C-alpha cells in the first residue's frame, strides 16, 4: 500500500479569533505572529460499584486550547486581552492551510469558550511571547473555511517576516 497522505505540519496551521459578541459585526482575524497552538481533549469514565460488578460508563469530553504568539501592537492582540478582561467568550478557528484546494477552502475546527489564562511576560533579551488558554464551552466542530486573498497575503507575509527578521541576540 502506497503512502498517499501528507504529514500535518505545524507551520500550515493558523488560528483565527473573534470576540463572540462581535460575531455578527466583525470578521475573524488571524494572529499575526503565532508560535504554537494546541487543541487538547480529555475524556473521563464514571464507575459505580455494585455488589456484583463495577459498572463503567463514558463521561463527557472536555477541551482546551492553548496558543502562544509574539505579542504585537495590533487590534487582534488587544481584542484577546479585552475579551479576557470583559469575561466574554472568544471564538477560535484552527485552520490547516495545507489542505487548501483550488477554491481556497481549508479544513478547519471551530471552538468557542472563555479565556482562563492570559500571560504577557516581559523578556529583555527577546520578543514578548503571550500565552492564552481557552476553556472550550462549544465545540470542537469540524468544517471548512474559505481564505480570502488578504488572508493568503497575510500568511505569506508572516512567513517572510519570520524568515528575514533578525532578533536582538541572534
Image: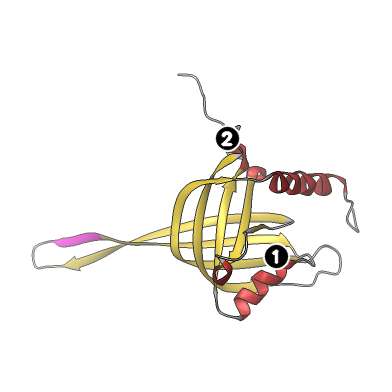
Q: Quadrant of residue 131?
A: bottom right
Q: Nearer the viewer, residue 2 or 80?
A: 80
Where does the image place residue 37, in percent across and percent down from the top left?
A: 61, 55
Under circle 1, the secondary element is helix
Q: Is residue 63 above or below residue 9?
A: below
The residue under the point 62% across, 67% down is 132
The residue segment tinted magenta is: 53-57
Q: Is residue 22 above or below residue 38?
A: below
Mark on residue 76? 1
Q: Is residue 101 magenta?
A: no
The residue under the point 54% across, 61% down is 65
- Quarter of the image with the N terminus is top left
Q: Is residue 120 above or below residue 3?
A: below
Where does the image place residue 7, in percent across and percent down from the top left?
A: 57, 35
Extreme residue toward the left, this view: 52
Q: Nearer the viewer, residue 74 or 12?
A: 74
Q: CA distance from mark 2 to mark 1?
A: 29 Å
The residue under the point 62% across, 59% down is 28
Q: Residues within 10 Å of mark 1 (few under 14, many from 20)?
A: many
| Drawn side of residue 78 relative to residue 58, left or right | right
For the residues carrying marks 2 and 1, which lies nearer the camera in this image?
1
Count of numbered badges drawn on the protein:
2
Under circle 2, the secondary element is loop
Q: Magenta part mainly helix, strand or loop?
A: strand
* Residue under pointer 2: 7
Q: Residues within 10 Å of mark 2 (few under 14, many from 20)?
A: few
Amino acid at each position: 500500500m502506497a503512502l498517499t497522505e501528507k504529514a500535518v505540519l505545524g507551520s500550515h496551521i493558523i488560528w483565527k479569533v473573534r470576540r463572540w459578541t462581535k460575531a455578527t459585526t466583525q470578521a475573524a482575524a488571524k494572529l499575526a505572529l503565532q508560535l504554537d497552538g494546541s487543541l487538547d481533549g480529555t475524556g473521563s469514565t464514571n464507575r459505580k460499584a455494585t455488589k456484583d460488578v463495577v459498572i463503567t460508563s463514558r463521561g463527557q469530553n472536555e477541551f482546551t486550547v492553548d496558543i502562544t504568539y509574539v505579542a504585537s501592537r495590533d487590534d487582534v492582540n488587544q481584542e484577546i486581552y479585552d475579551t479576557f478582561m470583559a469575561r466574554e467568550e472568544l471564538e477560535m478557528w484552527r485552520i490547516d492551510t495545507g489542505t487548501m484546494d483550488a477554491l481556497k477552502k481549508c479544513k478547519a475546527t471551530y471552538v468557542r469558550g472563555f479565556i482562563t489564562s492570559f500571560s504577557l511576560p516581559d523578556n529583555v533579551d527577546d520578543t514578548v511571547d503571550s500565552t492564552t488558554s481557552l476553556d472550550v464551552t462549544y465545540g470542537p466542530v469540524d468544517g471548512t473555511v474559505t481564505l480570502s486573498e488578504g488572508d493568503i497575503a497575510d500568511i505569506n507575509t508572516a512567513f517572510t517576516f519570520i524568515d528575514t527578521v533578525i532578533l536582538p541576540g541572534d
